[in-house]
Amino acid sequence: MTNPMPSMEEAIAKAYNDTLRAVTITGALTEGAVKIGIVSGVAKTISVTKVIEAKGNYAAEDVLSSDTATGDALPWTFSGIFRADNTGGYITTAVIKSETTDLAFRPTMYLYNVTPTGKMADNEANQNPLYADEAKFVGQVDWPALSNLGGMSVSVATASTVGNLPLWVDSASNADDLFGILVTRDAETGETAGDEFVVDLTLEQY
């Protein structure tokens, strides 16, 4: 006896369940892909490195940047972190690293979907986020204190630490980048001029 042909509804349901099973087995789709009918997003990590001027000790609430000249200082730019313009996603993990050992301050990064206008020069007293940038401001990451066990200084913010993660952020209508301003929450005197700081942001894209 031959098996009856499945109905259209049964065929669609089987195809959908097979797709779910394939995603479960193989893991995430390729970076930037759209998942139809799947709740979770695709993770993308962007890493940005700056050589910090550090010409003087940092007070609490000072900006950390690669230039001390106000007109030349630029934000930390996480280029192409969003899937596309006018989309969004959750920042799930944020890592900050410094080649200087024994740093112990707590960093904060203010995030924007358009280039901010506030102070961005190294060692400046922070005034961010400005109310003039309110429409661009999408949130902030508050890391635990940097620490080390003899190597570089590191701090990691996740959903299980302080830090405001996961944090939903929207992209601008004409850009797929995020911009950050890094600020100290504590004074720091162990800095070394010319050292590198690296910030990794992982975004679950939607």
Image (cartoon, helix red, strand yellow):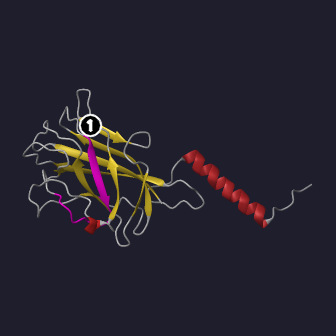
- Figure check: 100 above or below 11: above
Image quarter (top left, top right, bottom left or bottom right) of the N terminus: bottom right
From the viewer's side, name the closer residue of 162 and 91: 162
What crowding class fits label 1: few (fewer than 14 Cα within 10 Å), some (14-19), or many (20 or more)?
many
Counting from the top left corner in percent of width and height, residue 94 is at 35, 46
Counting from the top left corner in percent of width and height, residue 71 is at 11, 64
Residue plotted at (14% across, 59% down): 73
Residue plotted at (87% across, 56% down): 3
Asked which secondary structure carries label 1, the reply is: loop
Counting from the top left corner in percent of width and height, residue 102 is at 20, 31
Counting from the top left corner in percent of width and height, residue 128 is at 24, 58
- Figure check: 9 above or below 53: below
Q: Amino acid at mark 1?
A: Leu
Residue segment shown in magenta: 106-120
The residue carrying mark 1 is 146
For the stretch drawn in magenta, the main secondary structure is loop
